[in-house]
Amino acid sequence: MGSMIRGLFIGRFQPPHWGHVWAIRDILNEINELIIVIGSAQFNYIIKDPFTIGERIWMLREALREGGVDLSRIVIVPIPNIENNAAWFGYLRSYVPPFQVAYTGNPFVAMLLREAGIEVRQQPLYDRQKYNSTRIRELMLKDDSRWEELVPKSVVEIVRRINGIERLKTIATGEAEPHKW
């Protein structure tokens, strides 16, 4: 197992889309195994993070399966956020198996990883303007069915099953703040 290279890919996957699937497929051409960290694991039912960690794991696995990714080469690890950025890498490392290289498009995350001595590579990007979760959530809110072309069919199905669009609309009205009893 000496030459086995394990990589790390971090995202929120709110929701997973084709850009994620294609990037992960490309990354697997460079390495043996990929740890996919789903960040902000504790957040849900808010406009930026409408889907729960369980729903995101479900969507991501189905999306990757639909995209022809060998799931035996994937480890999915949900990680809650922490406020302490200086301590972030040690925190991250405690959640994941050892890895040699990390893929991220986030300059801040890249900086923290490089400071910890990790090789950081930019994952292949696929039309970021088109394939991005923020835009997909905006299209959902507008009842614009174009969002469905940006994600695998399995993700569309799951969003429908969990009433994800209705959830997003309810959250957007601002009524979703939990009551402070």
Image (cartoon, rainbow, N blue to C red):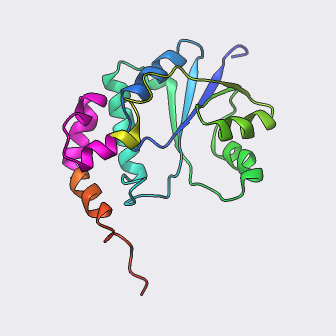
The x and y percentages for residue 88 are 71, 49
Name the residue at 33% across, 45% down.
137
The x and y percentages for residue 143 are 19, 46
Q: Is residue 35 above or below residue 25?
A: below
Q: Is residue 158 above or below residue 69?
A: below
Name the residue at 39% across, 75% down.
178
- Point out the image quarter for the C terminus: bottom left
Name the residue at 28% across, 66% down.
173
Q: Is residue 140 a member of the stretch shown in magenta? A: yes
Residue 49 seen from this side: yes
Q: How many marks?
A: 0
Picture quadrant of residue 69: top left
Outermost residue to the bottom? 181
Picture quadrant of residue 65: top left
- Point out the image quarter for the N terminus: top right
Taking 74 as reference, is 174 left or right?
left
Closer-to-camera residue (65/152): 152
Main SS of the magenta part reads helix
Residue 57 seen from this side: no
Taking 141 as reference, is 27 left or right?
right
The x and y percentages for residue 34 are 56, 26
Q: Which residues are magenta?
A: 136-161
Closer-to-camera residue (141/104): 141
Q: Is residue 30 a member of the stretch shown in magenta? A: no
Picture quadrant of residue 6: top right
The x and y percentages for residue 78 are 52, 46
